[in-house]
Image (cartoon, rainbow, N blue to C red):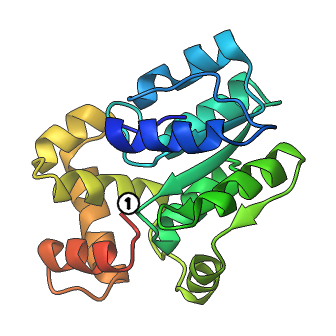
Amino acid sequence: MAEDVQVLRSALVALLSLEPDLEVVAELGTGDEVVARARQTAPDVAVLDIDLPGTDGITAAGQLAEALPGCRTLILTSLGRPGNLRRALAAQVSGFLLKDIEPAQLADAIRTVAAGGRVVDPVLALAALDSTPCPLTEREREVLRQAAEGTEPGQIAAGLHLSPGTVRNYLTAAVTKLNARNRVDAIRIAREADWL
């Protein structure tokens, strides 16, 4: 169980401990610890929040899928956006649920995931199907994401080992593809569509 809010993590562990067939073998507060602790404890299912300090839950899920293919992952989050669901599925998660579910639903979902099934919040699944695919390339998204964080084009270029002109070209391409007025508008459009 990886959840950064200690009181919530403790409550979830206590609730799951009431289930006779479930055992919580590790509790974590950061995403950086997920793979190492999973190697030590060999869980059947890892329940991860997305918004973890250090390595986020979706990235940790992808790392876990590579390091321990037998461990299945269920994302339990308050960040229920279609883009997060798509990223999680790309990281090979087996479940994606919102934190407002009933405790019995969580226990059932863990059982389903452990048995090889998949569990996805149905409303979020429909929203993901209805949403428009991102027109930006992964590199355009990365450049735009860094620009959204306030990083200057020269710094983005240095960090991504690109020339400043190439970075400006990626930013211009993002503005054009999103029919935005400028870079700030492109960032707004991409964030609202959950592409960043």
Which residue is drawn at the image coordinates 23% and 85% (left, top)?
Answer: 180
Residue 156, how many percent across, how many down? 21, 43
Q: In this view, does 79 lie above or below 153?
A: below
- Left or right, residue 30 beside residue 33: left
Furthest-right residue in this view: 115
Amino acid on which the number 1 mark rests in the picture: Glu
Q: Picture quarter containing residue 182?
A: bottom left
* Nearer to us in this view, 32 or 11: 11
Count residues near mark 1 (Cα–Cα under 10 Å), then give few for <14, some for 14-19, many for 20+. Answer: some
Q: Picture quarter containing residue 148?
A: bottom left
For the question of whether residue 94 can be seen, the reply is no
Q: In this view, does 139 lie above or below 16?
A: below
For the question of whether residue 145 can be seen, the reply is yes
Residue 28, how many percent across, how many down? 46, 26
Q: Name the residue under label 1.
A: 140
Which residue is drawn at the image coordinates 64% and 22% (left, top)?
Answer: 25
* Nearer to us in this view, 69 or 183: 69
Q: Is residue 150 above or below residue 31?
A: below
Residue 117, how many percent across, how many down? 86, 56
* Nearer to us in this view, 40 or 194: 40
Q: Picture quarter containing residue 71?
A: top right
- Left or right, residue 16 beside residue 163: right
